[in-house]
Amino acid sequence: MKKKIYLFILFFSLLNTNIFAQNNLMILKLSYGEVEIELFSDKAPNHVKRFKELANSGKYDGVVFHRVIDGFMAQTGDVQYGNSNSSNFNLSLAGTGGSDLPNLKAEFNDIAHTRGIISAARSADPDSANSQFFICFDAAPHLDRQYSAFGKVIKGMEFIDMIKKGDPNSGAVPNPDKIISIKSK
């Protein structure tokens, strides 16, 4: 009897772990290909929740990569002004907006900003992250514990590398690439 209970508990925990892992996987579709993202809900639960909410409601669909600096990062996620499918789209304002949801408190953590890390973009106020995020092309240790890292590209980083780069100083991208969609896997 004890053996059956132990096996049941073991089976349930393995199943639950697999479901949990699946719930933290997202697929980002770009014109270049699909990118698989793992989210770290244990490190930045509120940022992950917001990202999933905006992604699964289609808010990121059509949003441009408005700031892309070669060797550093690609920034996107301005659902207010950066959505090329919206009548509110304004490339000159892209990067200044967010969503209609309240800003998030910082969730700084021990995740190093290495290649493929996804982190919340914000203003000078640490508690100003809303909808924008960036993906690191390379290590950026100066961002560690200064920005809320909440995910990582685990497959398809070669497609992130193909995103059109902007001005080397400002990162501004004329005719930028856009997100086709982001959805839970």
Image (cartoon, rainbow, N blue to C red):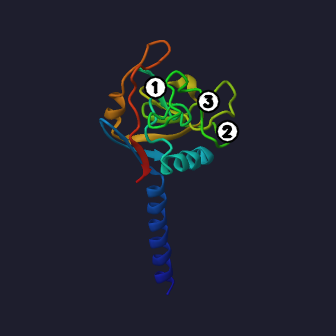
Q: Name the residue under label 1.
A: 73
Q: Residue 103 carries which label?
A: 2
Tell which circle, 1 or 3, labels the residue nearer the N-terminal end: 1
From the top left corner, tell me how far across and down residue 41 is, in percent: 56, 49
Position above or below: 5 against 76:
below
Q: Residue 175 carries which label?
A: none
The furthest residue to the bottom: 1
Tell which circle, 1 or 2, labels the residue nearer the N-terminal end: 1
| Residue 148 position by quadrant | top right
Report, in whole angstroms, how far the alpha carbon at label 1 lies from the one at label 2.
22 Å
SS assignment at label 2: loop
From the top left corner, tell me how far across and down residue 102 is, in percent: 68, 41
Position above or below: 31 against 44:
above
Amino acid carrying mark 3 in the image: Arg
Amino acid carrying mark 1 in the image: Met
Q: Name the residue under label 3.
A: 122
From the top left corner, tell me how far across and down residue 10 is, in percent: 47, 71
Report, in whole angstroms, how far the alpha carbon at label 3 lies from the one at label 2.
9 Å
Task: Please state if 4 lies on the left or on the right of 32 as rendered.
Answer: right
Amino acid carrying mark 2 in the image: Asn
Q: Do the residues labelled 1 and 2 touch (CB within 8 Å)?
A: no
- Which residue is at 31% across, 36% downward? 31
Viewer-proximal residue among 81 and 9: 81
| Local crowd size for mark 2, using a 10 Å CA cut-off: few (<14), some (14–19), many (≥20) | some
Total labels: the figure holds: 3
- Which residue is at 51% across, 83% downward? 2
- Which residue is at 61% across, 31% downward? 145
Viewer-proximal residue among 106 and 50: 50
